[in-house]
Amino acid sequence: MRLYRPMLFALLPLFASCQVFTERSVDPGAHHTRLQGEISRQGDQLLLRPCQEQRRFVIEGSQSDLAREAAPLFAAGATQLFADVRGQLGGTPQAGVDGSLDVSRLYQLNHEGPGCEDPNFKRLLIQASGHEPDWQLNASGRGLVLNRPGQAPLALPYLEEQLPDGRLNLTSEANGQRLELWAAPGRCVDSMSGNVQHLTAELRLDGQVMRGCAHFGGARND
């Protein structure tokens, strides 16, 4: 079960040198939508086709975070990417597309992985993972599960503490083990896949510190 508690103190001296995604100020009156879908390139433009849809939206802004992150992946040979973004849908006079998308926030951009076929995405509040050693943590409204190669999944209840500047902390002290996940806004690139995510992460388990990347799941509307 996910519970909240008052903020006790502002910790997280993590990742001070990480580059933070530029999240543009959002007009409170504007309607911004979160979308997941497949990114393709058509000439000098990027197009987003939402998951399980045939509509296509042209991405506005050649210097957006999405465009800057996608450029080297396409240059390296990728033909299609998975993106999780928030933005404002609009019209366009351009023929052959169904509208435009002005992206205000990039959650993740992947050139490998389950993408639109991820069965767990809609249930997750946050997913974090790292390497050396490999680990993956999935947190939902029903608890968290820590997966590590060669070990049984560790399922635990947890408390969530929301901190200033978009940071958060998940803690659990069940079953004689203490687990903490710290996450903070910042561009993070998975060292194995090259996938880009919008949160840096640090997992602390019984004194062991493991670092990685994280992103919000579909059950979280931050």
Image (cartoon, rainbow, N blue to C red):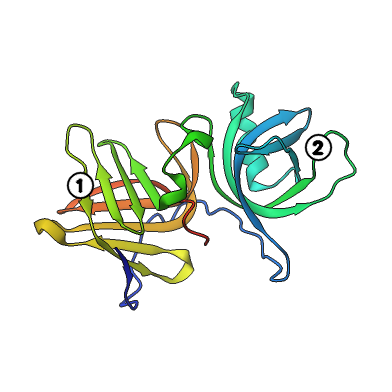
Query: In percent of the image, x 47 and y 65: which residue is there?
Result: 166
Q: Quadrant of the image for the N terminus?
A: bottom left
Q: Is residue 110 left or right of residue 192?
A: right
Mark yes or no: residue 104 visible.
no
Image coordinates for residue 69, horizontal then vertical, percent: 60, 39
Image coordinates for residue 128, horizontal then vertical, percent: 37, 47
Q: Could you say which quadrant of the image residue 140 lies in?
A: bottom left
Q: Is residue 106 left or right of residue 88?
A: left
Q: Nearer the viewer, residue 140 or 26?
A: 140
Image position of 3 with respect to 216: above or below: below
* Residue density around tag 2, few if under 14, some if 14–19, many if 20 or more, within 10 Å: some
Residue 125 badge: none
Q: Is residue 141 left or right of residue 39?
A: left
Residue farthest to the top, as pictured? 77
Query: In percent of the image, x 41 and y 48: which residue is there?
Result: 214
Return the residue at label 1: 154
Query: In percent of the image, x 49 and y 34: which residue is there?
Result: 117
Mark yes or no: residue 198 visible.
yes
Image coordinates for residue 100, horizontal then vertical, percent: 78, 46
Q: Is residue 45 left or right of residue 198?
A: right
Q: Secondary structure at mark 1?
A: strand
* Residue density around tag 1, few if under 14, some if 14–19, many if 20 or more, within 10 Å: few
Image position of 87 with respect to 7: above or below: above
Contact (Cβ within 8 Å) of mark 2 with mark 1: no
Identify residue type, mark 1: Leu
Query: In percent of the image, x 49 and y 53: which residue is there?
Result: 186
Return the residue at label 2: 97
Identify residue type, mark 2: Val
Q: Could you say which quadrant of the image residue 105 lies in?
A: bottom right
**Of marks 2 and 1, which one's residue comes earlier in the chain?**
2
Residue farthest to the right, as pictured? 93
Q: Nearer the viewer, residue 14 or 179?
A: 179
